[in-house]
Amino acid sequence: MLCLIGIVGLVGMQSGCAARTVRSGIINRSGIEVELVREVKGFTTQSRGFEHPAIISVPRLSNILGAIEVETRDESGVTVRQSAFHREIIEETATALAEAFAKANPDQELGVQIIRKVMHYGVFNKKYLTSFLAYIDEGHLYLVLRRIDWFVSSNFKRDTFPKARRDYRPMKFRVVSGEPLFYAGPQTLEIAWRDPAFSQKFTLPGSSKGTKRRREVLLQSPLSKTERDVLEAASTNIGIDELTPEQLRALANLEEDRQKGLITESAYQRAKRQLLRRR
């Protein structure tokens, strides 16, 4: 009887527990660490349906990473635009991504950490962390950026460096978007990685070209009536009760960024369509 009660209790506990993140390291070499990340509920891995394993060449990934930029605000409130990936880490990051995507399965995304070491007084004693999540879905490469060249305090040891998480945005920056680097959230890009533009080095309009560049205002991209009608039609027949809690939160964050003027109308409409189509 006691055994039966124990089994029933265990089953009940599994069915009611929340999903947890499980990480499996596959690359750990000097300066870079890549993990396969999956969501598990009870003892069951949650299905994600990613397009993994996938083969993407290192040169193409290098061109993609080199094109990604972010914007932050300095102390005076002026917008500063800069590369998301320091040129010193692009090639090794692209190499690790290519290797990891070839090993990932459809239920795993990549968790990536890169350490850039800077020499100070003749010694490599300053470290900067860049971390993000990556996955491929519906023909697009998604990068969820979390830390960009973040100074690592001496209090941190290698095994305690903070991991990239979907539910936590530790730094205040937003991605710069434009075809074929589409906005999918304040710190997330939906990248048409097969686009011919990435067969060579590529930059978005107004690129900082690897340096930090200040500008006073966010340039607004006009949205044509035709494009607006097409994008709005995608969500006309979708009710609130059809959306998941994650989609509702994402839409709320998107609307907040729109109200604050942090994204253009075109980027807002595109991101909204992308969220709603993933029902």
Image (tube, helix red, strand yellow):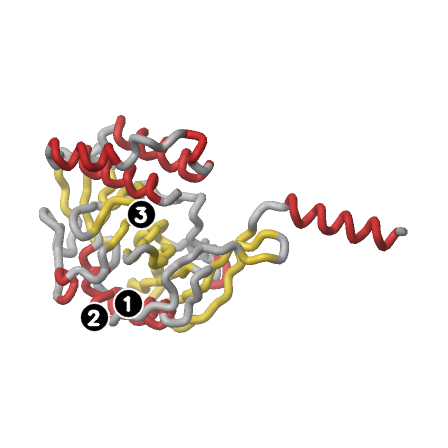
**Label 3 to label 1: alpha-carbon separation:** 18 Å
Q: Residue at x 38, y 37 (%)?
A: 250
- In terms of sequence position, does the residue under pointer 3 or pointer 1 come before the other? 1
Q: Amino acid at mark 3?
A: Thr
Q: Which residue is mark 2?
A: 59
Q: Amino acid at mark 1?
A: Ala
**Foreground residue among 173 and 103:** 103
- In terms of sequence position, does the residue under pointer 2 or pointer 3 come before the other? 2
**Foreground residue among 150 and 173:** 173
Q: Amino acid at mark 2?
A: Pro
SS state under label 1: helix
**Label 2 to label 1: alpha-carbon separation:** 8 Å
Residue 75 in view, yes or no: no
Can you say which quadrant of the picture contains the C terminus?
top left
> Does 38 appear above or below 232?
below
Question: Which numbered tag is attached to residue 200?
Answer: none
- Residues at circles 2 and 1 in contact by the CB criterion of under 8 Å: yes
* Res 62 → quadrant: bottom left
Q: Which residue is mark 3?
A: 188
Q: Residue at x 62, y 57 (%)?
A: 43
